[in-house]
Image: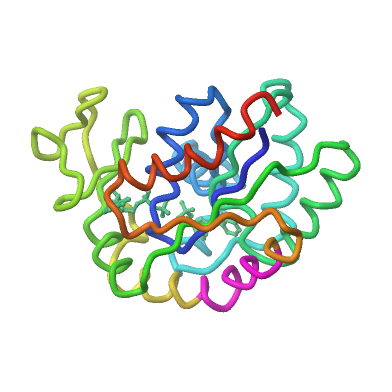
Amino acid sequence: MRIILLGPPGAGKGTQAERLVKKYNLPHISTGDIFRAAIKAGTELGKQAKEYMDRGELVPDDLVVSIVKARLTEPDTAGGYLLDGFPRTKAQAEALDTSLQELNTPLTGVINIDVAQEELLERLTGRRVCRGCGATYHIKFNPSTVRSVCDKCGGELYQRDDDTIETVKQRLEVYHRQTEPLIAYYQQQGILHSVDGAQEIDEVFQEIVQFLDKFVNS
Ligand code: ADP
Ligand code: AMP
């Protein structure tokens, strides 16, 4: 199955993606993770992306689209994939549609994780991520057993540079302006499925699984 996880920053896309890709054995394609890896590796792409990410802005469409297009031709995507954090603009969604039409591989569904604005600020400023395996925690809502240490791999937990209050506010504004219209875009295509992201992590997961189980083997 070919799935998009849509939702504002902090909705729980990465958290759910971690669990979903294990359950359905799908590659997890997170454009944010791709950019963070490029920054860490010190590549030209990383340098370009960092400028925008640090300001809480979106990386330009042409750059993001070319990366995702290339990723979707890699052999591990033949059996499907989970897109997390892409598309984020109408131009990206249209470019993806064109690409998938050419490949004759339509999207299976778009899962919109719905969370109220007030909750997002607390989720994002309390987020911690593992430097080793990328697992996501929250100091209050999903803490690691030992402070600052990943339960899964023992790696060090850190706070993302863009999870500061000022940058988070900017990212949420950018979401409303540029990404939220995609809800209507996919609704019109008849492939949108919204879930209540304000529930516990496991409850959100169960709701998504209930929807996705219908498409196993598609
Ligand atoms: P996104 O990938 O959509 O930006 P994350 O999955 O990184 O969001 O989640 C943002 C933060 O909120 C993380 O710290 C995560 O642990 C926490 N979180 C995710 N889902 C929930 C939930 N259902 N309830 C409470 N906190 C959550
Ligand atoms: P994320 O990890 O999804 O929260 O993304 C972190 C940052 O990476 C965003 O604030 C953007 O600056 C950049 N980014 C990730 N995905 C995209 C995308 N599809 N389009 C533009 N910028 C993106």
Q: Residue furthest left?
A: 146
Which quarter shows the C terminus?
Answer: top right
> Could you say where residue 26 lies in the image, as x and y percent from the top left?
57, 27
**36 or 5, which is in the foreground?**
5
The residue drawn where x is 16% and y is 43% is 143
| Residue 125 against residue 139 in the figure, above or below | below
Q: Residue furthest right?
A: 102
How many marks do you count on the picture? 0
**202 or 151, which is in the foreground?**
202
> Could you say where residue 147 lies in the image, as x and y percent from the top left?
9, 39
> Magenta segment: does it hold 207?
no
> Magenta segment: does it hold 181?
yes
Image quarter of residue 70: top right
The residue drawn where x is 39% and y is 41% is 205
| Residue 129 against residue 174 in the figure, above or below | above
Task: Identify the magenta region.
Answer: 174-185
Which quarter shows the N terminus?
Answer: top right
Image check: 110 left or right of 113? right
The residue drawn where x is 51% and y is 49% is 32
Colour setting: rainbow
> Could you say where residue 96 lies in the image, as x and y percent from the top left?
77, 51
Magenta portion: prevailing SS class: helix
| Residue 18 against residue 159 in the figure, above or below | above
> Could you say where residue 165 lies in the image, as x and y percent from the top left?
28, 71
Image check: 3 left or right of 122? right
**134 or 198, which is in the foreground?**
198
The residue drawn where x is 35% and y is 29% is 133
Image check: 101 left or right of 50? right
